[in-house]
Image (cartoon, rainbow, N blue to C red):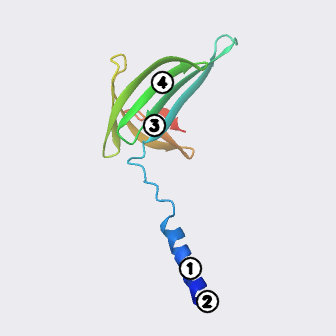
């Protein structure tokens, strides 16, 4: 009887270990949400919050949204590719110029940087 319990205990442990979190790792470090947010006050008047958001998906697609004070002003989709940790973004809307980004770090936060190395957004 003790051998049966021991066998069941070991079998349960093996099943639990085998069913641990097998989540797939991201295709690329750029996957996820990147945010640029600025707060502007003109002549010490009311503050205006501008927010730009890039959502990079693992299937090499994404969305870009611009909003002011929570109101959506503009949205478009894009496709992206990765070549040697340089990310080419091709927007579907002709109003947006295609872009190239790299990933950097500033004060311990991942940053999305343009071709000239300027920080464009922080990873959320």
In this figure, which residue is indicated by the disc labeled 3? 112
What residue appears at the point 47 percent right and 40 percent down from the top-left corner? 32
In this figure, which residue is indicated by the disc labeled 4? 65
The earlier-in-sequence mark between 4 and 3 is: 4
In the rendered view, tell whether residue 6 sits above or below residue 26: below
The earlier-in-sequence mark between 1 and 2 is: 2
Q: Are the two marked residues, 3 and 2, in contact with CB atoms closer than 8 angstroms?
A: no
Of badges 1 and 3, nearer the viewer stands: 1
Q: What element carries label 2?
A: loop
Inter-mark Cα distance, 4 to 2:
64 Å
User: Total marks drawn?
Assistant: 4
What residue appears at the point 52 percent right and 32 percent down from the top-left corner? 35
The earlier-in-sequence mark between 1 and 4 is: 1
In the rendered view, tell whether residue 60 sits above or below residue 68: below
Residue 8: which disc? 1
Q: In which quarter of the image is residue 30?
A: top left
In the current view of this chain or complex, which residue is farthest to the front? 1
The image shows residue 60 at horizontal and vertical percentages of 35, 38
- Residue 101 or residue 25, whichever sits in front: 25
The earlier-in-sequence mark between 3 and 2 is: 2
The answer to whether residue 45 is left or right of residue 11 is right
In this figure, which residue is indicated by the disc labeled 2? 1
Of badges 4 and 3, nearer the viewer stands: 4
What residue appears at the point 43 percent right and 42 percent down from the top-left corner? 31
The image shows residue 98 at horizontal and vertical percentages of 33, 26
Q: What element carries label 1?
A: helix
Q: Is any atom of residue 118 visible in this view?
A: no
């Amino acid at each position: 009887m003790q051998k049966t319990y021991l066998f069941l205990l070991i079998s349960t442990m093996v099943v639990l270990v085998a069913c641990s979190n097998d989540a797939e790792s991201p295709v690329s470090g750029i996957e996820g949400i990147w945010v640029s947010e600025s707060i502007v006050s003109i002549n010490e008047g009311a503050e205006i919050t501008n927010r730009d958001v890039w959502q990079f998906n693992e299937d090499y697609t994404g969305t870009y949204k611009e909003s002011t004070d929570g109101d959506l002003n503009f949205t478009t989709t894009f496709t992206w590719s990765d070549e040697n940790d340089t990310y080419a973004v091709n927007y579907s809307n002709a109003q947006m110029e295609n872009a190239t980004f790299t990933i950097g770090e500033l004060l311990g936060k991942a940053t999305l940087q343009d071709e000239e190395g300027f920080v464009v957004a922080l990873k959320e």
